[in-house]
Structure formats: C-alpha cells, structure tokens
Image: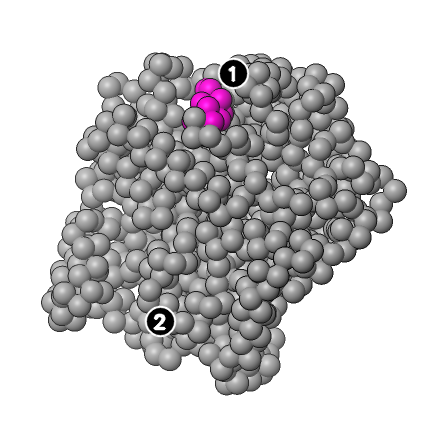
Amino acid sequence: MKTTILGYPRIGSQRELKKANEAFWSGRIDKDELLKTGSELKKQNWIQQQKLGIDLIPSNDFSFYDQILDACLTFGCIPKRYKNFDKNNFLELYFAMARGYQKDHLDVTAMEMTKWFDTNYHYIVPEFEKDQNFEFFSKKIIDEYKEALALGIKTKPVLIGPVTFLLLGKEKADGFDRIDLLDKLLPVYFEIIGELTNLDVEYIQFDEPCLALNLSEKEREAITTTYETIHAKFPKLRIYLANYFDCYGENLDTALQLPVDTLHLDLVRCPSQLDDILESKNYNPKTKLALGLVDGRNIWKNDFEASLKIIEKATSSILPENIWISASCSLLHTPYDLDLETNLQSEIKQWLAFSKQKLEEITTLKELSTPNNEAYLSLFEENKLANLTRQSSKLIHNQNVKDRISNLKEADSHRENNFSIRQAKQKEALKLPLYPTTTIGSFPQTKEVRNWRLKYKKGLLSQNDYDSLIAKEIENSIRFQEEIGLDVLVHGEFERNDMVEYFGEKLNGFAFSDYGWVQSYGSRCVKPPILFGDVSREKPMTIKWSTYAQSLTDIPVKGMLTGPVTILQWSFVRNDQPRATTCNQIALAIRDEVVDLEKNGLKIIQIDEPAIREGLPLRKEDWQHYLNWAVKAFRISASGVNDETQIHTHMCYSEFNDIISNIADMDADVITIETSRSEMELLNAFVNFKYPNEIGPGVYDIHSPRVPSLEEIETLLMKAKNVLPTQHIWVNPDCGLKTRDWPETKEALKNLVKAAKNMRKRELKLI
C-alpha cells in the first residue's frame, strides 16, 4: 500500500505567487524574479510531500495562472488573435491570453474564463477552430519533471486528459464538434509521453474529470480510443487515470475496461463506487485503485475509523500492493497549513485539517492499515476524540435557528405580486431612463484602503479614525459616479474584505482563519469562512454604510448583499447536516438584512448569487433536487420587501442554457451577468428562453486591465438591443471592480456611460 496525491496548492503559504505575479505585471520585478519565485514554491511543495511520507509526488500541478491555460500553451492551442505576439516572449503571450493586452499598438482581449466543474476555481476556456492544429509548444511538463529530479524526487507528471481538455473548450465556429479534434490532438500527447518516457518516467497522471459527467456514447468511445492507443504505443507506461468530484456513474464500465494501471476514486463525493467496482464483472483486480478518502475540497478532519473500514473492504478483495491511499481530488482547493493558525478557537481548530495536515492524514491511514503498527494508535484515538467532540459541541447548535427553519412557509419564498406588476411600480418609483447604468458593487480597493483595514484590525487605527477614512472614500466614489452620470450608484464596499468573508464575520456560526487562502483564479485568492454551526444574524450588517452613501445623493444607491447560495458555496461548509438546511439558515439571515435595508430607505437591493450555477451537481439526474432548494433559498432571502423595492442579483462566469428556467424562477427584478468575454454569447440563453425580467449583460471585462473603447461597448449594446426588449436592458460591467485600479476604472466607466447615452439618443430618433 502506497500514498499519492493528485496535486498541491501553488500560491504559497503566504500567497507568494500572488504577490510575485502582481509585481511582475506592474513592472516591479522582472521575469527572472518571477520564475525564481515559482521554482522556490515548487521545491517547497515537493520537499514537504516527501518529508510527510507521500510515496508518489505529482509534478506539473504548479501553474503561474491556471493549469488549463498551461495546457493550451503545451498543446499549441493559441487563438489566432495572439498571432502578433513574439512566441519567444513566453510570459507576455501567456499572460495576454489570461488577462488581455493593451499597449504597444496591440489591443487584444483575454480568453474566456469559467468555473472548474462545481468549484469556485476559474479556468481559462480553450478555443477551437474547425481547422485547429496542435503542436508541442510549451515544454513546462518536461522542465518541471527535470526540476524535481534534480532534487532527487522522481515525480508523477500530471496531464489534463485529451478528452476532458476538448470538452472543457468551445468551438469558435459552427459546423464541427470539438471532440472530432482528438485525432489531431493525440499526436501531441504521444510526443509529450515519448519525451517523458525517455526520461524514465514510470507513472503519468491523466486527469479525466469528464468521467464524472453524463457523457455521450461518442465521448466514451473517445476515452476508450485515447487510452487504448496510448497503451499500444507505450506499453510500459503506467497510466494513473484520475476522475474526481463525483462517481464514474454510467461511465464506469468504460473506465474499468481501459488498459490503465490505476483508477482514482473520489470516495468523499461518491463513497458507493468502491462497492460498484468490486462487484463489477469488468473489474480486473490487477488494476490498482487509488482510494480518495481524504477530502480535497473541505477542511474537516478525516474520520479515520470510517476510512479504515473502507480500506479494509478494499483489501478484502484486492492485494494491498494494488491500493493507493490518496485525497479525493487535488488539494488546490484547501489552504496550506493549519499550524500557521494561532487565533482560531482551539475547540474548532481541533476539527480541522489543511493541506499539510491532509498529507499527514494520508500517511497515517497507510500506517494504520499496516498490521501490527501500534506506533500510530495514539493518532487514531486523538482523531476519534476530535470527531466525537464535534458532534456534541454546544458551539454548533442553536435551537432558535432550528425552530425558525421548521416554521418556514411556502409564502416566505414569494414576492407579493408578479414581475409585471412590480416592474410598473418600480418604474414609477425610481424614474430611471432607458439603458440605466450601474456597476456591480465594488470599486477599486487601493493599497491605502487595504492598509486602513489592516491597521484597524490590528488595533493601530481607532474606530473613529477608520470610519472617517471609509466615509471619505465612499463620498469620493459617490461624487465620481454622479460626475460621470451613472443612474444607480453603489457605496463602493471599501469597508469589506471578501464578499463572503465580510458577511461571515457578522453572522453567528462562522469562524475565520488568518492564512486559509485558496486560489480562485490567477492572482485572485480568497479566504473562505469556516461555516461550522447554525447561522443567525444578531444585528444589521450593512445598514451603516449603505444609508450613509444614500444620504449623500438623491440618486438611488444599491444596498449590496451576498446571497445565501454563494455564502454557502464559497465557505468551507459543515458536513454534519444537509447543505439545503444550512442554506436556508443563511437565507433567513440575509432576508432580515434585506428588510432592514428597505426600512432604512434603500429602494434597490442587490443580492449577488454568482455561485448558483457553480453549485449544480455534475450529473443531470441530481440537478433538480439542488435547484429546488437553491432557488428557494434565494427567494426566501429576497421576498420580504414591497413591490416597489427593486431586487437585483448578479451572476458571473456561468453557462445558463440548461438552467435558464430556474434562473427565471429566482424572480429577481434585474439580473446582471458576464457576457463581455463571450461577446454576448451567454445572452442567447436568456433570449431563446424569452427571459421575462430585466437584464444587464456585462459590457466590459473587469478581469482584464484593458480599457474598452466606446465603440466596443456600443457594439455589444447593439447586439443586446437586437435581441432584448429595450426597456429591459441595463448597462454595467460584468463584475465588481474591486481588483482594478482607479485610472482604468474611471476611463472604462466614462465610456460605459457615454455608450448608454448614445443608445438613448438612437431610441429617441426611432420614436
């Protein structure tokens, strides 16, 4: 029995990669310094895993931005709009694809970005043309293997599987199916594998999480063709095939018949699949099984007693040497090291395990499974006690919250009247023009703003001094918005850290780490709250600054809240009760805040739900159950106000085609979405469905530093006007502006307002 993992966090325990990337982008460090930081992080990760007893350590799981972007460069899958970039200046090309580029007479948009399966990690979406060619362009996978080898560590290189790579991408023209590009892509894989085997690589990990999806027969045949062909060409290669985030499901027989050395099982998300495999007539006991027992998506301590029972079941049918002990998926989704946390309440801390501790759990499970290994029994007893104390802890349970959940009625999830009646009342109350302009909520959080918050948190800035600084920043942002002519304003959220963490800090049932950072995309890191107990709101959370902002202007200011599903999805959520129950607890807390905002004069309230699509189960047969409770939770949060109060919601980087009716069921008066990177492509779902409510299709990409031109924004608005009722269209960026700088933000928003005014002039000429 041996140990392995699928991947490790790459941002550094102190977010070293984030800081180095942003310093490189701003010109404060050069390429060599950035590459040095990357090399040091890889070295630390490999040595850490070796030190803690991981037998087969992955390489090529590191990335400066995103592993699928890395794959695009590896396979030479570079969109034609980047043809003028010097391919020898690799990092310039790489980051232009990730972030866009606007200088030296080049103005190029970034590639699309969307959620990695049902996680809050974002990947860069590959783009495919009908005449697509591939080549072995970036040698990163070879270089990293050599880097580890130089340290005396023989690794398992990680490659995204060819079928998953194709399915994760998009056809950029009609008339072909991206899966038909497999014959062109496979020769590049053969070249990569050939170079690796020449270096005496024993194992290569092929990540094929598409095997957790509902695949067509054609797609399953592509999987079979891929691995039979690789095996035929490289019969000595040991293929480690990794699926995660769900069961193999109806793809199991296909997977079991593949000529692979090892099948990886996510036994956290799908504990039943081990039985399915052991009972299958297609399972060859010589095929190794990697038991993904340690949760790679959450931070709760493993239950050794339960895991050992699963290992025992496996060893009753399989030789121990054919079993790997592993995490359920890459540890990319969990923070680095719990040992860094000195401020967490000790009772809660004993229930947790971050990435370093998960390595220790994997090794301990291996040792506990070894006969007569009594040295680890004390760790077993310690683990058992921690899990028992969590079950009975008084920190977790609040009877008042449980009673409120049990007393929920159907009427609590419905507005008083339907949208058409509400829309008429809101138009009368708000008196907004056609193409009303707004932003999504946040404005740039400058270094000074972040520094104020840090000093305040450390007690170096008094409450009065901190409040004065925040008040001035809010006033400046209101005056700027008034000056450029926005129709609905925001207070800027300068007092907030992360959109989920901020609310978690004000709700009961949450705990917080100091170093629990995980990567969301590129250099964007988030520190998810630890949702450990029943959730309730003791007092208002946002009234102070929202009402202050509204007091500064006669123009409507939006109250800004994060929705219950997003707070749930972007937290490390308790696993001792159904997620639907926890979500309803959050919904009631948000509902209380919505009602208080209305009482305090806010006429527009935005409840952001970017994670609705993200939470969708991977298998379609499981969708409806999730959508029922997720949509209902949003409606509970939004339905306590009068018809005249306009409820907005926001969603970004999501595909809506297959759940558009459920989005409509949320019954928000206005929804704002990301459409700029896809050039309004995502709008098609709303058009085809005849979405009944108002919609703000984002007209510029805030994840790129480039400033969109006036003509560019007008072109997108004309596309929207051609397919949507004019009276339903809002004009806004595609997401919050927190991560941007003020100069580019001001220029972009000025262009946005001008574009909206030009659209109104066109309408007047038509009347």
How far from the left and from the top, in percent, is residue 331?
A: 50, 47
User: Is residue 551 shown in magenta?
Assistant: no
* 413 horizontally vs 340: left or right: right
Q: Which residue is mark 1?
A: 136
Write down the quadrant of residue 740 in the picture.
top left
The numbered mark, 2 or 1, whose residue comes first in the sequence reads 1
Q: Residue at x 20, y 49 (%)?
A: 446
Q: Identify the image quadrant of the N terminus.
A: top right
Q: Which residue is mark 2?
A: 506
Amino acid on which disc 1 is placed:
Phe
From the image, give the main secondary structure of the stretch colored magenta: helix
Q: Residue at x 54, y 69 (%)?
A: 382
**Residue 726 appears in the picture as rendered:** no
Q: Which residues are magenta?
A: 138-149
* 635 horizontally vs 341: left or right: right
Label 2, residues with CA under 10 Å away: few <14, some 14-19, many ≥20:
some
How far from the left and from the top, in percent, is residue 38?
A: 35, 33
